Amino acid sequence: MPIERLLIANRGEIAVRIIRAAKAMGLHTIQAHSEADANMLAVRMADEAVCIGPAHAAQSYLNIDAVVAAAQSTKADAVHPGYGFMAENAQFARALETAGITFIGPSADTIDRMGDKVAARQAAMAAGVPVVPGSKGRLDTVEDAVNVAAEIGYPVMIKAAAGGGGRGIRIAQTEEELRKMAPQAQAEANAAFGDGGLYLERAIISPRHIEVQIMGDGTDAVHFFERECSMQRRRQKVWEEAGAACLEESTRAHLCDTAVALAKAVNYVGAGTLEYLYDSKTKEFFFIEMNTRIQVEHPVTEMLTGIDLVQEMIHVAGGGKLRQTQADITRTGHAIEVRVNAEDPFMQFLPFPGQVGALRVPQGDGIRFDHFLYEGYTIPPFYDSLLGKLIVHGKDRDTAIGMMASALEELEIGGIKTTKPLHLALARDPSVQADDFHTQWLEPWLTAGNLKPTP
């Protein structure tokens, strides 16, 4: 069904991003917001807005009944969930379907299947996609975990069967550690997701984190090449690149082909990302999970390919077929994105909400800043600290790193502390410039005192 009226069930920079894409398609935009977000930029930009509840997310952005009611009252044809909040909530997708409203994303059944790490792993194996050796199903007891670990060998990574964001993850080097850590992981997973199920996989030491962007229309699927997201702090991505300079061309082609094979196998609709661990020593890659939504880091892929991924996911959700064949999708140059958060990097990344003072956004060819800021705007303390994403696109990786450093120097967000100093230090670091890092690289780098205040 063609979409004419779109409700955005999210906030911050992704809400602004969706509104811009939707308006370019000629759609009427409706911004859902909490009481605390009544003055955010997305509310000002949308054609209309509707309040869905109090500041706390549980009573607004995570309230299924409130969002569905808002969509019905504003006569929305569809709802875009963005990322986070209810973007991967199958119950939410089903509630919209019951109400006759299109969910911009895959079906609830697909979210259930691919959002559960164990089910996603089984689907990957069935599609011939390499997976990290691990448990064949969910584990509900410590003894089950101990038996699996004995088969696959230590060290093992303990993960929550449901959810993401690094919650519940532990690495056990021995059976003694596994017996101690498994109950802790179960408790954390249960608190975060309401599901204490676990699964185990072999721990790949110092891997690179590579992901592939795909789009499907339920029949066909294509990829938009890969991104590298190895620069992480506490398992949260900090700096992302497209493409992955560590990959040989033959490996890149094989990796992307496996992503498309899995998307086709599950009749995927919309934008999705398949995440892999890459062992640069053995040149092996292993599927770890799928994110059934648009990713925070999607702009680097858009810069690399010149294709608006948000518009494409709206198009296929409305019943359209893919508008690109694989041969149509090409990549040019290199793109880098950094996440600019309202945090003080010199105070253990303490959140720093407050009022935005002078705002200066970098300009120029190949520079993009996705954000939701304006001078005088007060950042509420209730939500994620992400302010925006600074993205650059250059002819090669060295050029892109130089552009990033220059753009960061130009960026000014007055009145609050941000993670800009971290990104400037990374852009100037010899190991980053040499593409010599991995998923466990950043935290020891910080502990060693490499991030220093500017005199």
Image (cartoon, rainbow, N blue to C red):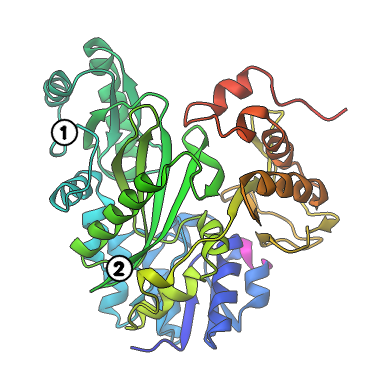
The boundaries of the magenta stretch are: 36-40
Which numbered disc, 1 or 2, marks the residue closer to the eye? 2
Q: Is residue 290 visible?
A: no
Q: Quadrant of residue 69?
A: bottom left
Q: Residues within 10 Å of mark 2 (few under 14, many from 20)?
A: many
Q: Residue drawn at (46%, 35%), measured in percent from left and top?
A: 235
- Residue type at mark 1: give it: Ser
In the depicted view, which residue is nearer to us: 228 or 164?
228
Q: Residue drawn at (52%, 86%), measured in percent from left and top?
A: 27
Q: Residue drawn at (33%, 59%), measured in percent from left and top?
A: 89
Q: Give above or below for 330 relative to 21.
A: above
Q: Is residue 38 magenta?
A: yes
Provide the residue designation for mark 2: 221
Where residue 33 is drawn, which disc sits there? Answer: none
Number of marks in picture = 2
Residue 398 image point, x, y percent: 66, 43
Would you say 58 lies left or right of 257 here? right
Residue 119 image point, x, y percent: 18, 49
Q: Give above or below for 414 relative to 270.
A: above
Would you say 450 lies left or right of 67 here? right
- Residue type at mark 2: give it: Ala
Residue 335 image point, x, y percent: 59, 53
Provide the residue designation for mark 1: 135
Q: Earlier in the sequence, mark 1 or mark 2?
A: 1
Would you say 438 lies left or right of 423 here? left
Element on which disc 2 rests: strand
Instruction: For the C terminus, give its image quadrant.
Output: top right
Q: Give above or below for 192 relative to 430.
A: below
Instruction: For the N terminus, give its image quadrant.
Output: bottom left
